[in-house]
Image (cartoon, rainbow, N blue to C red):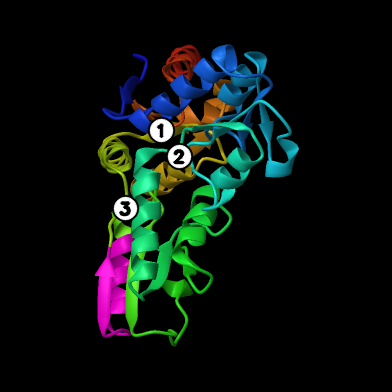
Amino acid sequence: MSPPEILISEFAGYCWGVERALDLARDAAFNAKKPVCSFGPLIHNPEVIRQLEAQGLSVIEREEDARSGTVVVRSHGVEREVIERLQRRGLHVVDATCTFVKAAQEKAARLRESGYLVVILGEPAHPEVMGLRSYAGPDALVVENSDMLPGELSSKRVGVVVQTTQSQERLAALVGALASKVRELLVYNTICNATEQRQQSAQAVAASVDVVIVVGGRNSGNTTRLAEICRAVQPNTHHIELPDEIRKEWLEGCRRIGVTAGASTPPDQIEALVAHLKGVAS
């Protein structure tokens, strides 16, 4: 029996925003005023974070833990006043916030200033969403799906912004649910292009294979979303961080194996996964 065919999603792995953040962080690690740290993990990929730490970029979780030197703001962004506070304390700040996240922050602030109740579609505990909420105001609502909407809203003028890694399907469902609850609805679709590309190409691969392997950090929102989308099409979908997590039984009887990866997954991790699959499936 011939070995299974491995199909790699057309769009998989690093997006432009992640590459930009990594370039800024590595430059800071070598050239900026020491010590150099990032406010939270720069991206949601544990292996990459370990590599950055080896290059001199430590991770802090609280802004008060930065006492001197340089702070790199993670690609997911931070709350509205954090950068100003760090700069006032004399710290050098390198802002690696993804430009799509920046755009979502600006739109959330614009909605708030225009008197809209802001509804954020996203994961409440995700750092990107926590940052967005600081721009959207204290009365903003954060929902992961339309089912989380309250029966009554505090305003009939509602504006929507979206965590950049959410899916179009969830946004469409939320807009549909809001339409009957409000008089005025302004929607900013702030899902980034790279997310859409990865989701669409992953979905296409999932529809044509017997098993899907999604590689990327388990704390990565966009990677988790890819796994959800693939699983809806191909239930035999598995989200892993490292190739040695793969079980041979996942591949038994499979003629075609699909591979995709989140936007925070580097090319070498995809290549390592493919090499491992060839070994396990042979």
- Residue 160 position, x and y percent, is 34, 66
Q: Badge 3 is on which residue?
A: 190
* 3 or 2: tag closer to the N-terminus: 3
Q: Verify CB contact (< 8 Å) between mark 2 and mark 1.
A: yes
SS at mark 3 in the image: loop
Q: Over which residues does the magenta segment extend?
A: 170-187
- Residue 196 position, x and y percent, is 28, 43
Q: Badge 1 is on which residue?
A: 263
Q: Nearer the viewer, mark 3 or mark 1?
A: 3
Instruction: Please say if 146 is above or below 257.
Output: below
Q: Nearer the viewer, residue 268 or 122?
A: 122
Q: Nearer the viewer, mark 2 or mark 1?
A: 1
SS at mark 2 in the image: helix
The magenta stretch spans residue 35:
no
Q: Can the viewer see residue 62?
A: no
Q: State the image quarter where residue 275 is shown.
A: top left
- Residue 130 position, x and y percent, is 54, 55
Q: Nearer the viewer, mark 3 or mark 2?
A: 3
* CA separation in Å, label 3 and label 1: 16 Å
Q: Badge 2 is on which residue?
A: 223
Q: In the displayed structure, does residue 160 sit left or right of residue 87?
A: left
